Image (tube, grey):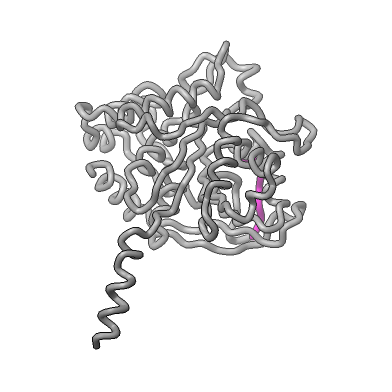
Amino acid sequence: MRSSILIAALLLPFSLFAQKQKVWLDSDTGNEMDDLYAIVRLLKAESIEVVGLSSAHFNNPDLLVFEKWNAYDTKNLRTLEDSQRLNEEILAAMGLSQLPHPKGADRQIGRAWGGQEPRDSPAARAIIALVKSLPDGEKLDVLTLGALTNIASAIILAPEILPKIRVYSLGAKYNLGTRAWSKNEFNIRNDLNAFDYLLDLQGLDFTVMPLETAFPLQYDRDDTYARLNEKIPVEHILENRWREQNPQDKTRVMWDLALVQAYLLPQYAEVLTVNSPPENKTITVKIFSKINKEALVDDFWISLRK
């Protein structure tokens, strides 16, 4: 009896000071409204330690040939800068401006015909420095809500960080019935080179949330407006984002929030190991294959009030 009490007493200090999992979030925040909800949810999480929030570009061919992108005029639109601006607004509203929030790259790795030339950026360098500072046995989890440019560039610039990172991304499509992949998807199209680079990378711990899995997480506009409190600065930002960008939409799929919630609440998500696309070098990759929509919705609103 005394020995078990002694062991418990010795272990107590270690449990009290156990390190929380460090998480870096990379977001093309300026693109759509769901990025903001995902960022706020992750920043509210008590189970992990958010150590950085970087901005990602959402450059795409439509910006060159159409007058509008969502609610933006495409003329003079600088996608990276808009993502950075919104990141800084969210952090300020939550009193978290001290959190590292470096700018990412403004374009894909390589060129239009392929390639793996990295895009150096403050975000890539910050990720590298952070991973190198981790003690033995610790890893950094990197969640990406847009193009994979920043994390791919970080690994290309410093391949020695590979064993100490795990990557979770939203993007691509995967048909569970036919077991077929499709890269014909917005995030992947914005840096196909980066996605292929990561899928070809032996030893990378890589988990993808395909669009089919995220699709059930849909929010009702009027219900969302009713739940948000405009007197709370960050909630005011969330409501205004919907009103400014997508006021005509009665419902919105919360793509990016689905990834964050599945990561934070694995008990409400299923993960499968599947064959990677046949054109890539790795044999398998992990995917989120199913989420519990109701549980994730309920958790978001509870967490927002904390």
Seen in the picture, residue 286 relative to 25 is either above or below; the reply is: below
Where is residue 238 drawn, in percent x and y? 33, 30
Q: Residue 56 is drawn in which quadrant?
A: top right
Where is residue 235 drawn, in percent x and y? 28, 31
Seen in the picture, residue 233 relative to 14 is either above or below; the reply is: above
Q: Residue at x 28, y 50 (%)?
A: 298
Residue 212 appearing in the image = no
Q: Residue at x 67, y 50 (%)?
A: 160
**Left or right for 47, reference 78:** left
Q: Quadrant of the N terminus?
A: bottom left
Front in this rendered view, residue 11 or 267: 11
Q: Residue 265 is drawn in which quadrant?
A: bottom left
Seen in the picture, residue 108 relative to 293 is either above or below; the reply is: above
Front in this rendered view, residue 301 or 125: 125
Q: Residue furthest top?
A: 75
Q: Residue at x 51, y 45 (%)?
A: 143
Where is residue 177 drawn, in percent x and y? 59, 61
Magenta-colored stretch includes residue 303? no
Q: Residue 218 is drawn in which quadrant?
A: top left
Residue range corresponding to the magenta coloring: 179-186
Number of numbered tags placed on the structure image: 0
Magenta-colored stretch includes residue 183? yes
Front in this rendered view, residue 114 or 294: 114
Seen in the picture, residue 263 relative to 67 is either above or below; the reply is: below
Where is residue 58 drawn, in percent x and y? 57, 29
**Left or right for 91, reference 122:** left
Q: Quadrant of the C terminus?
A: top left
Front in this rendered view, residue 241 or 62: 241
Residue 37 appearing in the image = yes
